[in-house]
Amino acid sequence: MQRDNLLTVLVPTRNRPHNLAGQVALFAKAGLKTIVADSSDPQKAEEVRSTCKDGTEMWTYAPDTRFFDKLADAVSRIETPFVQLISDRKITFPHAVTAALDAICQREDYVCAQGYVLGFGVHDNDIDINRVVFFTPSIEESDPLWRQYHLMRRYQSWQFSLFRLEPLRRAIAQANTVTGVVFQEIMFMNAIVVQGKLARLPKIMTLQTIEESFSRLRDIDPFYWFLHDPRSFFRHYVRYRNLLARFICDNATRVPLAEVHHILDAVHAVWLRYNFDPGILNFATQQLLEAKELQLPHPRPAPRWRRKKLWDVAHSRPKAGRYIWRRSVLKAEPREEIIISHDDIKRVETQLDAFFDA
């Protein structure tokens, strides 16, 4: 398949030049058109610019540009029918991107495709591939409200995936109707899934670093936002719910608006319950009763380095160190949803060699 006139790879970035050189090199080698949309501070912007080689374009934005504002402008300038969004704190593999493109080119009712997202850390020269981050199965129901339910009941972000251009543009515009990082992300994803089906390919598409978001935890985690300021959380939720309901009624269903409101409240109760930790809730409540400032543990602490175990698999890297595939990845549950093949492992390691040599 001729891909150069079908796909644009878009890398929105801010203040993470250290992750870009290898990523840009991978896509340049694969011959995929790549655009870096940078809103770094001045001292980092020059480092980002230095990574944009081999035909990679760089579009520059002011450092205070909001994420979805930057996406809206960048995507408005793209002309290919498909766009792959790339996170600047992940390593995304071209072979998985082209497989995603091939998969949905033939299926007009699919608007998005993603593979597995795994987590990794670096210890000396060892690359420790230690957890499965995103893996939930394809969302293929014909009814948009059922698709929305299946997205939210086990919510995992598909924000950095391969998208059809027009549904992507509409979803970005819809995300910009609300405020708050959490609600912008889930508005974006809900607007995507309302427009069509989502495909999960049994391939490793991305490795995620242990780097944290630049946003505060309370801004990106719904449970922590609720604990710190429940009135603000629910005020933002009501506006988000109302706008999402209107989008669904205008674009995807003839169900009455009041009924859609009811369905969305029930679905989001499932989502919130999935995010709630009763132990942390009790701990936070005790601090509030004692008039203390909330001091809460991180809900998803980065895995600590540990020595290789017998059931882990290690492969030597070309120069020094190893790729260590933990049993928690190779035998991840649920087994029927996570299928990582030996061939895919070999492809990932080959591309990681190129990434770390860039």
Image: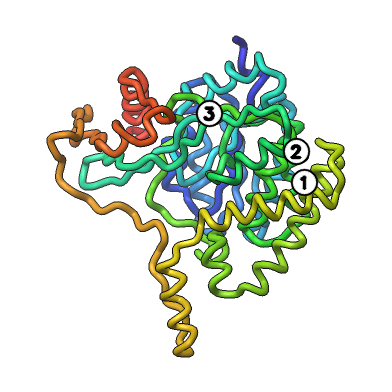
Do tag 3 and tag 2 residues touch (Cβ < 8 Å)? no
Residue 339 sits in which quadrant? Answer: top left
Point out which mark residue 169 bears.
2
The residue carrying pointer 3 sits among few (fewer than 14), some (14 to 19) or many (20 or more) residues within 10 Å by Cα, namely: many
Q: Is residue 55 visible?
A: no
Q: Which amino acid type corresponds to the residue marked 1 in the rendered image? A: Ala
Q: Residue furthest bottom?
A: 291
Furthest toward the top, the residue is 1
What type is the residue that disc 2 sits on?
Arg
Q: Quadrant of residue 290?
A: bottom left
Regarding mark 3 in the picture, which secondary structure is present there?
strand
Residue in the image at 63% along x and 50% along y: 185
In the rendered view, does 250 fall on the left or right side of 64? right
In this view, the residue farthest toward the left is 310
Q: Amino acid at mark 3?
A: Arg
Q: Camera-side residue: 316 or 225?
A: 225
Residue 85 vs residue 33, the one in the foreground:
85
Q: Give the image location of residue 89, x and y in percent.
A: 46, 46
**What residue is shown with label 3?**
200
Which quarter shows the N terminus?
top right
**Going by the image, does 88 lie left or right of 4?**
left
Q: Which mark is residue 75?
A: none
Q: Are marks 1 and 2 in contact (CB under 8 Å)?
A: yes
In this picture, is 249 found above or below 300?
above
Label 1 sits on residue:
173
Mark 1 against mark 3, which lies toward the viewer? 3
Decide: is 59 above or below 198. Answer: below
